[in-house]
Amino acid sequence: MLRGDAAHLPLPDASVDLICTSPPYWALRSYSDNGEHYDGQIGSEATPAEYVASLLDCTREWVRVLKPSGSLFVDLGDKFSDRGHGPSRGNGTGRGPQATLLSQTRGPMEKSLLGLPWRYALACMDDLGLILRRDIIWSKPNGLPESVTDRCRSSHEYVFHFTVRPRYYAAVDEIREPHTSDPDAHRPGRNSMQARNVSLPRSSTGALRERDPLGKLPGSVWDIPSQPLTVPAHLGVDHFAAFPMELPRRCILGWSPPGICVECGEGARAVTDEVGWVRGKSDPVRDTPSRYRSPLGRQNGNKEGKLRQITGYACSCPEPFTTMRPAVVLDPFGGTGTTALVAAAYGRVGVSVDRSADYCRLARWRTADPAERAKAMMVAKPPPVPDRQGSLFDLDEPA
């Protein structure tokens, strides 16, 4: 845990493999340092434009420490304009200087959604030249209730995936999702041939295309419930918002290497091999983990299909390597230390940075607490040992 400023990180250039963070939301709450509100914290700016400008200053610093092969994931929530009734700095009563200044300037009308996540994302592309690879919707099935009666309640946030270069490290095989059959396959009036043709993917020419036996690419909507965190009273931290562990887990597995080769400096990526065939209409590999089962041979009368699984990890050295060091995962708004905790559970080095002494104290407790570490380990697996040669970069299909 490092006490520091997200806009002035105590880290060398190009030293981080992945950044996964959630900056403070604008005009939402006051963060404390030894129990006292401190000036200059992100989220206390007078206007949305100043808030976005502050985040851009931080993001420039993140790009400095991020490797060219790295990815940046930023989670941001939005806010509604409420002129005259905005949050305060420090007392949490719902009235403060942000609301007063916003009411004196031109801006979104009262009750309008401010669109802060997208203002930030567009500025990252336009002003910093970052590549926005994906906007991910974090859908919260157990989101908090709201008292409004004239609009839908808020049940999602945005997670933006940025990169510096078009080619970067990716290991999506680690987080592929199970294939789903055609939802209309058993609809009345559908014959078996229609079901068989619709449920299988097709190429641009119309030919049937075999699905990846490891599963389908993860979608852009992540249904992840919030995860409660009970903090000991002696820490003296009352207001906190913790990531659910599942959110950084997907980012860490999918876009940070399990190890860095000490010879070439590149990240190891998964090597997959065909290990057999699936036969018959029923499920002939019931004891095989679902992520390794082929979707063929179980759906729509197919007789057989390939079975593929991850068999090792490799870099691009001409000879197989045996020595690697852990990848570095950074959260510049470390908060409760969730990202660092999950990164450590998956064999990475988690670096958590925060200006608040209160939050640094909380994060140190959490990353060292046996119960919290056990929760992280429940979804983790031991870091693999690379055993084959391979290549670092995954070249995406044209967007």
Image (tube, helix red, strand yellow):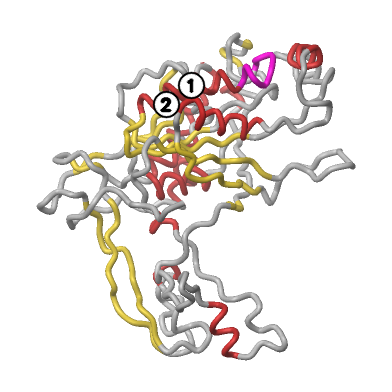
Q: What residue is shown with label 2?
A: 62
Please state which amino acid type lies under the numbered disc 2. Trp
Q: What residue is shown with label 1?
A: 58
Q: Is residue 185 positioned above or below 134 on the image?
A: below
Check if residue 46 falls in the magenta segment.
yes
Q: Nearer the viewer, residue 193 or 304?
A: 193
Residue 102, position in %: x, y? 76, 16
Residue at the far left: name it. 319
- Identified at 82% across, 20% down, the residue is 83
Q: Is residue 199 positioned above or below 355 on the image?
A: below
Please state which amino acid type lies under the numbered disc 1. Cys
Give the CA separation, mark 2 to mark 1: 6 Å
Q: For this view, does 319 lie left or right of residue 343?
A: left
Q: Nearer the viewer, residue 108 or 85?
A: 108
Discs 2, 1 touching: Cβ within 8 Å: yes
Q: Nearer the viewer, residue 284 or 279?
A: 279
